[in-house]
Amino acid sequence: MELSLKPDFDNTKKRINAFWHCEIVDRPPVSIILPKENPSPLPEKEYKDHRERWLDIEFRAELLDRELENSIYFADGVPTVFPNMGPEIFSVWCGCPYQFGETTTWSEPCIIDWETDSQDIAFNPEHPLFKATVEFTRLLIERGKGKFIVGLTDFHPGGDHLAALRDPANLAMDLIENLDYVVQKLEESYKEYFHVYDIFYNMIREADMPITSWTPLFYEGRYYIPSNDFSCMISKEMFDEIFLPGIIEECRFYDRSIYHLDGPDALRHLDSILDIEELNAVQWICGAGNEGYAKWIDVYRKIQDKGKGIQLQITLEELPLVFETLKPEGVWFSSIYGIDDMDTAERVVKRIEAWK
């Protein structure tokens, strides 16, 4: 595959494929994206409200195209984009009302009473926002051919999908009072999700692009980022009983996967996640106020000891400590904060090349 914005894409592809197996070719992958010195001006447009701006997918596709052209993709930085319609769009396609803000979106619960509402909640292929996401994907694919990779949107299936349908606080109570409804809807929703995933998967693969998403790893088969942010609200025992089977099913459905583990309250589930044989890697997000690689060395070591890959987001000053505490095999440097110019980027990559 050739990309005009990333002429050395084949080298990065080899490193990412090695990462999925916790191996290295010449060094771990290092994603560095720098702004061009003389960027082209970006198009501008005014809207009456946020919804109109979010749904102007023709203009958004043009804007994303221009933004990608204004960057330099050094080392293993790759020009990727995805049709972002907000983090709970799959739940909206299944019945949730949706609100559009300046920088994000949010859904409103649609299951007020399990007995009367749950049977009417299902994926609707005629939903206007589903059709908009399909069209947005198509527009990006047209613009991206030979230039950049188009990814899957942010689906958020499983437990987070149910939390959107029901509201997180209500879902927490449902695990005690309405467990049969929860289990049934969870099983139904995964069948719907796998069907939806394949719709977009087939669009992208038919365009001869690998699969990526909001986390810009990629693979030529099914790839995604399983997660369950709702799990911060429940015990390990309840997570293992109710939600872990669905996450395992997801990982078996994908060919490559990296689990999104979000926040210290989710760490109680790390052992369960690491026991998923089909899972390839973990994306640990410590959360605001908990930053600092040194605080989480034991977490990263535990992930490596279980043979899973690691996504690292660190500062330039933390790099020596990474060298001291981890093995290079199975590490992906997705962000190294403090790299602001090409000279620094080149020095950092050379340092990582020498890491054994």
Image (cartoon, grey):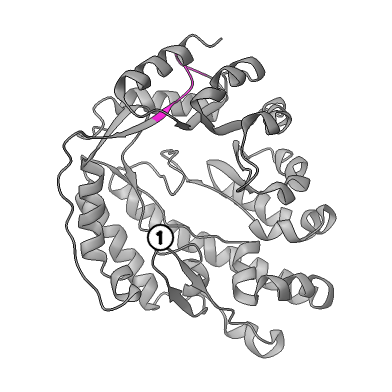
Relative placement, left or right, of 133 versus 108 is left
Q: Can residue 9 be seen? A: yes
- In the rendered image, residue 28 lying in the magenta stretch gets the answer yes
Relative to residue 301, is residue 163 depicted above or below? Answer: below
Relative placement, left or right, of 63 versus 202 is left
Which sits in the foreground, 189 or 312? Answer: 312
Which sits in the foreground, 106 or 241? Answer: 106
On-image quarter of the N terminus: top left
| Quarter residue 281 falls in | top right
Seen at 57% across and 41% down, the residue is 258
| x then y, percent, for residue 40 | 15, 44
Which sits in the foreground, 303 or 248? Answer: 303
The stretch of residues the image draws in magenta is 24-31
Relative placement, left or right, of 189 versus 3 is right
Q: Can residue 303 be seen? A: no
Q: What type is the residue that disc 1 sits on?
A: Ile
Find disc 1 in the rendering and name its residue.
Answer: 199
| x then y, percent, for residue 338 | 43, 29
| Quarter residue 52 falls in | bottom left
| x then y, percent, for residue 154 | 47, 57
Seen at 72% across and 54% down, the residue is 245
